[in-house]
Amino acid sequence: MAIYVHDRLLELMEAEGIKTLFGIPDPSFVAMFIAAEARGWRVIAPHHEQAGAFMADGLWRMTGRPGVIVGNQGPGVANLAAAAICAAKENVPTLFIAGQRPRLYDQRVRRGRFQYTPQPAYFEAAMKYVGVIEYAEQTDEIVHEAFRRALSGTPGPVYIEYPMNMGQAQLELPPVAPPERYRLTHQAADPGRIADAVRLIKEAELPVLLVGQGVFVSRAHAMVAELARALNCPILQTPGGAAVLPGLEQKTFPYASPVGTQIVAAADLVIAIGTEIGEPLHYGVGRHWAKGKTDRKWIYIERDPLAIGVNRAIDVPLVGDLRDVTPQLVAALGPRGHEAVGQLEAWGEESAALKAQMLAAVPKTSTPVHPARFVVEATRELPEDAVIVRDGGAVSIFTGAYGQIAPRDVLWCQNFGHLGTGLPHAIGAQLAVGDNRRVVLITGDSSFLFHISELETAVRKELPIVCIVGCDYAFGLEVTVYKTVFGPQSPETEAHWGEQLRLDRIAEGFGAYGEYVDRAEDVAPAIKRALASGRPAVVQVAIDARANATEVPGFDEFASWYGDAGY
């Protein structure tokens, strides 16, 4: 039986486990939207296509399945460009489906055409694949190639152009093939390399497990936790991998923390998993790595063979999908694994003592609220299984330093540093977890304002995200950078757009729950009420602009991400 191309597109995406479609309704895609809803899909219309792509990103990070965003011809597709660049830097395999004028029209030699621009050229640099469906019969091969590229090696975004003349096109094809028929779905490491890794682990006095965001995006929490227990070693969080493996809180330390740097210096073996070894890690050679046992060995679990040996030498590359390689390594280590590291308990106690000292030094009361106290109060009564979304500059860094829960999932744009992703990420994450967990966004006001209109999307879709917004009414981290580099001059960054800005009232205008707080003791009760409301909520907290600009924790470490990091 003949079916329309848009129905076939939906079938092909369903084969990859996809049942959510983001995009603004338009004649180019109305038939696809109607068909998707009839098939039981969730269709989510954002207020800006860029935000829709970030929602798809949030969904991917919490499910391990690619998100799909459609953009209508011309301006709709143009609105996706920044999100496409961000997806490329964040290694997010979003499928961008772009509308376009009919293919014949697209190929004609004309000037002054309305809502038309040659679109693929604008996306080619960011995308792992760009395909145009010129003929209905190409649909399967183009979509298969898109998923093949998006999910092979390092994940990344892909682009499919869907001209309007496809809207009425029909075709007859056999049932959709499962993914394993057209792409590599499992990628285990070479057994000889696994044996080499086991030998290095057995010989090591102090191995460390360096865990990045890829572990959590892959939804590999449990299997990597099993590897960590077999290794009996410290776990270092990369800046991007700010979450904690279940049950291993006392063995987990941030990479650049005081205890983390001790561990780096003492380690004679690093097992890196789910992470790039890039600037935030000083390429694995500079800054903290240049101290202590600088001849330490490296094992790298990585999908992309082209990443091996680029930023630093790797002694044992385990090329494969960490979801396949991790069980291999656990099985090869055997029941005894590695002998327990003697210093581990002492490091845990030292880390706990340092955290207690940091907490004791935080001002207990102030008006406006000190940003460190803001984070402490904002996180101390959150559900233990809350999904934390971070956005902004200074507020995001304060959140990483002073958060009072050990989250299983943290979403933020560490690779690209893109602002404004937080609210859309939270929407995508809440769609992923449903009613099982709460999603909490902690953000600064300037970043929250990027896509504040998406509060209406959360209200319309009944997504009970809680947005905790620290308001310094300025571009906080930029103030820090300007003052550090240029002295007192900081044009526009300290604009103070006005304490009359009431995000709580804007939230109420959208139909969400809103509260305004300017005292530390009122923060946690307000958040408790926001959670209890069961609605999308905004808790606006006035924070100290001076402290937010001049007391950013670990700013020197953040600044060290720029440059060659000792190369």
Image: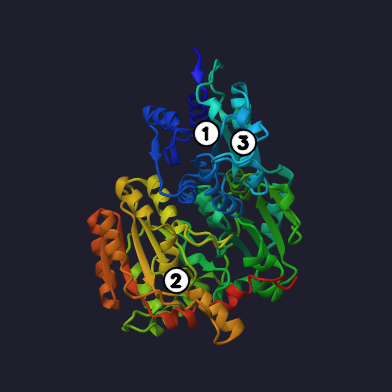
Q: Residue at x 71, y 57 (%)?
A: 200
The answer to which quarter of the image holds residue 542 is bottom left
Where disc 3 sits, the SS reads helix
The answer to whether 70 appears left or right of 141 in the picture is left
Answer yes or no: is residue 152 visible: no
The answer to which quarter of the image holds residue 261 is bottom right
Give percent across and percent down for residue 311: 73, 61
> Would you say the residues marked 1 and 2 are in contact, meaning their CB atoms lie under 8 Å apart?
no
- Give the residue pinned by disc 2: 395
Q: CA distance from mark 3 to mark 1?
A: 12 Å
Answer yes or no: is residue 541 visible: yes
Q: Amino acid at mark 2?
A: Val
Give residue 529's mark.
none
- Give the residue pinned by disc 3: 146
Give percent across and percent down for residue 36: 41, 30
Q: Is residue 396 above or below residue 37?
A: below
- Badge 2: how crowded within 10 Å, few (<14), some, or many (20+)? many
In terms of sequence position, does the residue under pointer 1 or pointer 2 come before the other? 1
Give percent across and percent down for residue 179: 57, 30
Where disc 2 sits, the SS reads helix
- Give the residue pinned by disc 1: 16
In terms of sequence position, does the residue under pointer 3 or pointer 1 come before the other? 1
